[in-house]
Amino acid sequence: MKIIINNSSMVPIYEQLMEQIKGMIVSGELGAAAALPSVRILSRELKISALTVKKAYDALEEAGVVKTIHGKGTFVTEANRNLMHEQQIREVEGLLEDALRRGRLYGLTPEEMREIFEILLEK
């Protein structure tokens, strides 16, 4: 499982971990019933606190994405990948709406905003 933590990000590490695991589920990289690494193993691999990994796993479990079976591990549930993907799309739409609102506030034209968007898409 390839997870990249950005320590300089304003996004808390547990949220970065959650989003990347959700992304792996949506992409099919992690299928239903796939086992996640143990809290200790993942914390050692990522060089982060075991409490941070536990917090991410607990939040994923609360969201119904994973299920922890004591003594056995944490496993991906039969969660609806399409539903998670739809939630991610809505989140991105909200962020784009905020960016457009700010662009209008700064007096950018629709063409300038399209140009910025196109440049960012190419990165």
Image (spheres, helix red, strand yellow):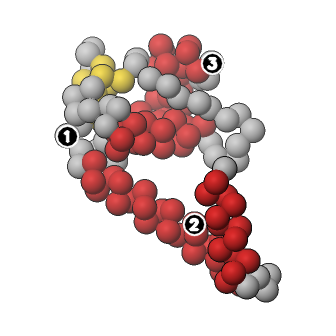
Label 3: element kind: loop
Q: Earlier in the sequence, mark 3 or mark 2?
A: 3
Residue 51 position, x and y percent, is 53, 26
Residue 18 seen anywhere in this rendered image of the structure: no
Left or right side of 14 for 119: right
Mark 3 and mark 2: Cα distance apart in space: 30 Å
- The disc label shown at residue 122, or none: none
Disc 1 and disc 3: Cα gap in Å? 29 Å
Tell me residue 13's x, y (percent). Answer: 60, 37
Q: Earlier in the sequence, mark 1 or mark 3?
A: 3
Check if mark 1's residue and mark 3's residue have beta carbons within 8 Å: no
Query: In this rendering, is residue 46 above or below 23?
Result: above
Amino acid found under the numbered disc labelled 2 = Leu
**77 vs 54, nearest the viewer:** 77
Q: Position of residue 28 (x, y in %)?
A: 31, 37
Residue under circle 1? 78
Q: Compared with residue 73, is residue 19 higher up or lower down, i.e. above or below? A: below
* CA distance separating discs 2 and 1: 28 Å
The disc at residue 47 is 3
Residue 50 left/right relative to 102: left
Residue at (50% x, 25% y) in the render: 2
Nearer-N-terminus badge (2/1): 1
Considering the image in quadrants, where does the N terminus appear? top left
Residue 84 lies, with reference to residue 50, above or below; the image says below
Residue 30 located left or right of residue 88: left
The reply to whether callout 2 and callout 1 are in contact (CB within 8 Å) is: no
Farthest residue, direction right: 106
The amino acid type of the residue labelled 1 equals Glu
Neighbours of disc 3 within 10 Å: few (<14), some (14-19), many (20+):
few
The residue under label 2 is 95
